[in-house]
Amino acid sequence: MALEAIKYSRGELRILNQLLLPHLTVYEAVKTTDDGWNAIKAMKVRGAPAIAIVGCLSLAVEITKSEFTSVEALVEFTRERLAYLVTARPTAVNMSRAASDIGATLCQLVARPGATIDSVEKGLLEAIEAMMAKDLSDNKSLGRFGAEHIMANSQKDKAIVLTHCNTGSLATSGYGTALGVVRCLHESGWLERVYCTETRPYNQGSRLTAYELVSDAIPGTLITDSMAAFAMKERGITAVVVGADRVAGNGDTANKVGTYQLAVAAKHHGIPFYVAAPSTSCDLTLEGGEGIVIEERPHAELTEINGTRVAPPGIDVWNPAFDVTPQDLITGGIVTELGVFEPSKLKEALQAKEK
Ligand SMILES: CSC[C@H]1O[C@H](OP(=O)(O)O)[C@H](O)[C@@H]1O
């Protein structure tokens, strides 16, 4: 595994500042939910699962360091802080899902006969830590399901994969989602090469995915976003595998901006297009992708590079951090820790899991 994005022990949380990678490896302390919110907003830590993990663990750290005068004060604090953390980056579902799960656990803890501040606090910390640990343990099976599906549906004995953004240890603090599929292909001897797009404007691909590939000695080639369709035409790509920030009930998927055009190009070239996402990134409350809020980020992310202005003052900017790929373009399937599903079958499969 390339790098540990998040280091946690009860009462202490440190995050790897991904804005400084690959040049500097700097861990920063997160002591409060305000620190957590700011780190997520600034994208010091990013990636749907990692956002939820840092957000929730920042709450656990702040609770550990705080004194509460009553159970009601602890409940009010927890609910208000969870609602605040969800506002940092609205597109990925993981933080809002985790907030709702923690809220439900809190209700159960308070309802227990003889509940005290200590018993509720202890139960809350244990639940948050268990939830965050579980979220990391599923990814290996996701990687395996994806790798096996790609090989079972390919005429080639080795895969050449194209991926977008960063979906590895730095996005999940685990094996990775789309990059977990790549890791499993590589470990199984089934990977010829992976092409990673630089993923403007934050450059998750050139700064983070390339870093993970080099660290793990996985054969990778960096391309610009604008080269992707030509690579599909010229470089024998056998599958496109990307991550997800929020998958709607019909399989429409919000992911890093640029994903939609990769899906269109893959369709044109007859290349299977996969979305790799844990079930915690799926939002069955949404019928389709039109309901997904797309975060828009600061103009400076486009007009400046490393603090140097590259675009003339006065030019307008549109900087959506994500786009939505309609389910009919996800031709390979949606890879989860439960298996690979056609988009239309996803909701049924996940509801069966919840029973
Ligand atoms: C495994 S989640 C990775 C997901 O998150 C990325 O967005 P960001 O770097 O802005 O948090 C991108 O959409 C990835 O697919």
Image (cartoon, rainbow, N blue to C red):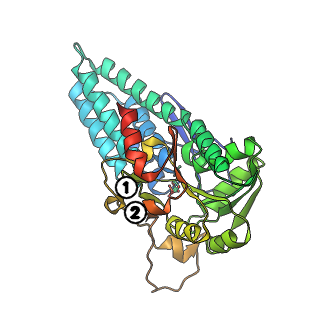
Residue 70 seen in the current view? no
- In this figure, which residue is indicated by the disc labeled 2? 295
Residue 163 sits above or below residue 62 on the image: below
Question: Which one is in front, 269 or 5?
Answer: 269
Residue drawn 44% across the image and 33% down it: 61
Label 1, residues with CA under 10 Å away: few <14, some 14-19, many ≥20 = some
Precedes in sequence: disc 1 or disc 2? 1
Question: Which of the image's four quarters has the N terminus?
Answer: top right
x and y, in percent, of residue 162 in the image? 65, 60
- Residue placed under numbered mark 1 in the picture: 90
In contact (CB < 8 Å): disc 1 and disc 2: yes
* Disc 2 within 8 angstroms of ligand 1 (CB): yes
Q: Residue furthest top?
A: 114
Q: What percent of the width, then of the height, locates residue 21?
A: 65, 55
Q: Residue at position x 40%, y 34% from top?
A: 353
On screen, residue 297 above or below 247:
below
- Choose between 44 and 103: the one closer to the eye: 103
Q: Is mark 2 on a helix, strand or loop?
A: loop
